[in-house]
Amino acid sequence: MDKAYRISCIKVVVIAIAILTNLVSKAQQISVIASLDTNKILIGEQTKLKLTTTATPDYKIIWPILKDSIQKIEIVSNGKIDTSFSADKKFVTYTQALTITCFDSGFRAIPTYQFGYQIGKDTSKQFIISEALLLHVIGLVVDTTKAIKEIKPPLEIPFSIIDFLKEYWPYIVGILVVAAFLLWWFVFRKKPVIQAVKEKPTPTRPADVIAIEQLKLLEQKKLWQEGAYKIYHSQIADIVRTYIEHRYGLMAMELTTDEILQGLKTLADSHKEILSQLLVLADLVKFAKAQPIHYENELSLKNAYEFVRQTALQAPKDIAQ
C-alpha cells in the first residue's frame, strides 16, 4: 500500500467523523417526543396525548397542523402551547396537551407528527418526526349468563325551599314587583273624582224670548266697538247655540258648525244661510283670530235676531230629529 492511498483513506475517515459529529450535534440541539398519559383506556374514556419539542433558542419551531380526529381517535380539545426554559436558559421546551378519546375498541395507532424548524437566520426548512404510539381501547365486557335487569327509574330529588329560591329568585322578584304595582294601581292609587253630569234645566220661559233678551244685553255692551271681537262673536254664537238646544233638542254647544247645520235637516235654506254666516264668522274670529269689518259685526247680530224670531214661529212638527 503506497503513501498516497493511505492519505486518501485518512481524509475519508476525517470527513466521515465530521459529518457524524455535525449530525450528533444537531440531534442534541432539537428533539421531539410524543407520549400518552396511559396507553390503555376504556371505550369512551379520555386521556392526554402530549407533544413536546425541546431546542436551543435559535431554533424556530413550526408546529404541525392538528386535525379533529386521528383515524378513529377523536381529539376532544387542543390545549395551548406552553413554553418553558431550562435552568441554564440554553434550551426551550414547547409542550401541547391534547385530550383524546375513542369509541371503538381495539388497538389504535397514533401516527407520527412532523415538526418543521429553521435555525437562526437560515430560511431553509428542516423537519424532525416524533415516534408513533399505540393506544389500547378496551370494550365493556358483558356477562351474557346473567339476566337482563330492568332500567332503574329516575331518582326523585327531595324538594328544598332553599334550592327552589336559589334557582327561581329572579322570577319570584319579578312577580312580587308586578303584584305590588297592580295593588297600588287598583287600591292605593288616588281615584279621580267623577262629578255627576247635571242635566240642563228646562227654561220656564220660551227659548226665543230668552235668546232675544240676551242678544239685546249683548248689543248694549258695545263689545266689538271697543275691539273685543272674540268675546262679541263668541257670545252671539253661544246665545244662538243655547237657543237651538232648547228649541230643537240638538246638543249644539257640543257640536261643530257643520254638525249643527247637518243636524237641522228640516230647517229652511234661508234660515240655514243666516245661521251659517254668524257661526262660521264666530269660528274664524275665535280660532283664526280674524278681525271682522264694521258691516260683518252688525250683520252677525242682525242674523242672530232674525234666526231666533223666524224659527220661533215654526210649528213643532218642523223640529229636527
Image: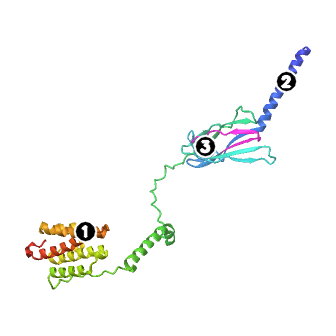
Q: Nearer the viewer, residue 152 or 6?
A: 6
Residue that mark 3 sits on: 136
Image coords of residue 288 (percent x, y): 31, 66
The residues bearing labels 1 and 3 have C-alpha atoms spaced at a distance of: 105 Å
The magenta stretch spans residue 142: no
Question: Quick one: SS at disc 1?
Answer: helix
Q: Mark 3 and mark 2 in contact (Cβ < 8 Å)?
A: no
Q: Earlier in the sequence, mark 1 or mark 3?
A: 3
Q: Which residue is mark 1?
A: 281
Residue placed furthest toward the right: 3
Q: Position of residue 46 (x, y in %)?
A: 59, 49
Q: Nearer the viewer, residue 79 or 3?
A: 79
Judge whether residue 273 can be spotted in this image.
yes
Name which residue type carries label 2.
Val
Magenta-drawn segment: 50-68
Picture coordinates of residue 20 (x, y %)?
A: 80, 29
Q: CA distance from mark 2 to mark 1?
A: 130 Å
